[in-house]
Each structure stands twice: as structure tokens, then as C-alpha cells.
Amino acid sequence: AVVVGTSGATAASSAVSAAEAAVQAASAMPASIPVTQPLPSAPPKGRTVLFMQCEEVECSYEGTGMKAAAEAIGWTVKVLNYQAANPATLVAALQTGLQYHPVAAFFSGVPQEAWQSEQKAYAAAGAFLVDNFVATTPAGPGVAPGRAYQADMTSLGKVLADEQIADSGGQPSNSLVVNVPTYDVFGPLVTAYKAEIAQACPACQFTEVNVT
């Protein structure tokens, strides 16, 4: 016979409740935009921003949103293509983009060490480089903060593990974690996922598969 201690059952139940609450909170759509402080004046018209579009479909979604935002304030978006798997193409696109006298260049998924050679030129031009979806937050001259860095991805990895725990009710379950090591932004996500599973549901299991 196997005797389950009351403290063990209580801890498991508490972990499931915490996971369910985390999933519910993460699944709720915001009712309002959290940024409420107005600009001191309307942005000047006629500026140009660069959108560096990678080969992934997610990049096209970002570009669509950026075009809509730029149109709303009377700005223009110039789209230049690059391949995230070949950082040299991003550097070439950034060099080309300076001829359009941009106020900023937006792109995703390429660590700073691959494009930092362009920071000095952009800073001298009064333009910003905004890199999103990388594990380490970019910094230094010519760089403006974007989104989806280590803290964001750590939170996402934790809540994905919580979803597995909530769905299974804390019972033994299996999941498949598909990682793309080319994009280092997924590293913190996978690390956080593993840590949450180990801490909150030791009986749960996962298989990690790396793909290109």
C-alpha cells in the first residue's frame, strides 16, 4: 500500500491552484492600453522609419502593425528584407537604410553582437536601432529599448508550464517542447519552462526537440 501524506497532497493542490490562476491571468485580454501619459505635442509629420523584415511570417505581422501605426501619425515605413539566419544580410540592410534618413530601424531576433558595428553610424544620424525578441536586452549608443527580452520570455516559459500543470490537474503528464536554437530568445523560455515543471509538478515530464 502507498500512503500519501496530507502535506504532500496539499502542496500538489496548491501548485495546481497557482498554475490555474497564472494561466487565467495570462489568458485575459487587457481592457485598456496601459500607457496613459500623453505626448507633450503631436509627432512631427513626414518622418521615415525602417522595418527590417525577416523571412519568418511573424515579421510580416509586425510590419503590418507598424505600417498602421506610422500612417496614423503621418509617417512612412520603408521595408527592407533580411534573413535572421544570416545576420550579414541585416547589417547590409541597415547600411542601405541610412540613405532614407530614418528616425529608427526596427527588427527582431538578431543578437546585438551581430549588428553592433552599425550603432555608431545610426547614433551619428540621430536614429535608433530597435531590436526585439532577443535574450539579452540591447544597449549603448544608437539603441532604443524594444520588447520580448529575457524577462518577458521567462514569464512566458513559466506560464506555458503552468498550463500543462493546470490542464493535467497536477497529475503525471507529458509535453513536447519544440525549440529553435537559431533564435536565442527561446533560451530563457525553455529554461523557465523546465524550472517550473521541476518545482511545481515533479511527476510531469517533457521532451525537448531542437529544430532549424
Image (cartoon, rainbow, N blue to C red):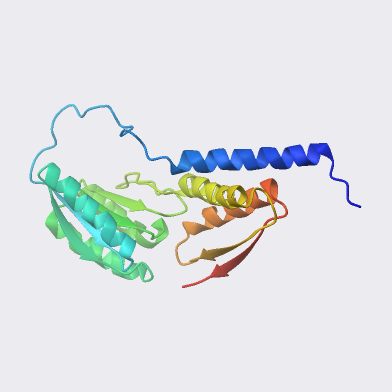
Which residue is drawn at the image coordinates 63% and 48% (left, top)? Answer: 196
Q: How many marks?
A: 0
In this view of the protein, which residue sits in the foreground, 193 or 147? 193
Q: Is residue 181 above or below residue 4?
A: below
Work out which residue is located at the far right of the displayed protein and give it: 1
Which residue is drawn at the image coordinates 22% and 27% (left, top)? Answer: 38
Image coordinates for residue 106, horizontal then vertical, percent: 27, 53
Image coordinates for residue 94, horizontal then vertical, percent: 25, 61
Image coordinates for residue 34, horizontal then vertical, percent: 33, 32
Q: Is residue 106 above or below residue 83?
A: above
Say whether residue 15 is left or right of residue 8.
left
Say whether residue 87 is left or right of residue 93.
right
Image coordinates for residue 39, horizontal then vertical, percent: 20, 29
Which residue is drawn at the image coordinates 59% and 66% (left, top)? Answer: 208
Say whether residue 176 is left or right of residue 36.
right
In this view of the protein, which residue sits in the foreground, 191 or 110? 191
In this view of the protein, which residue sits in the foreground, 55 or 94? 55
Work out which residue is located at the far front of the displayed protein and give it: 1
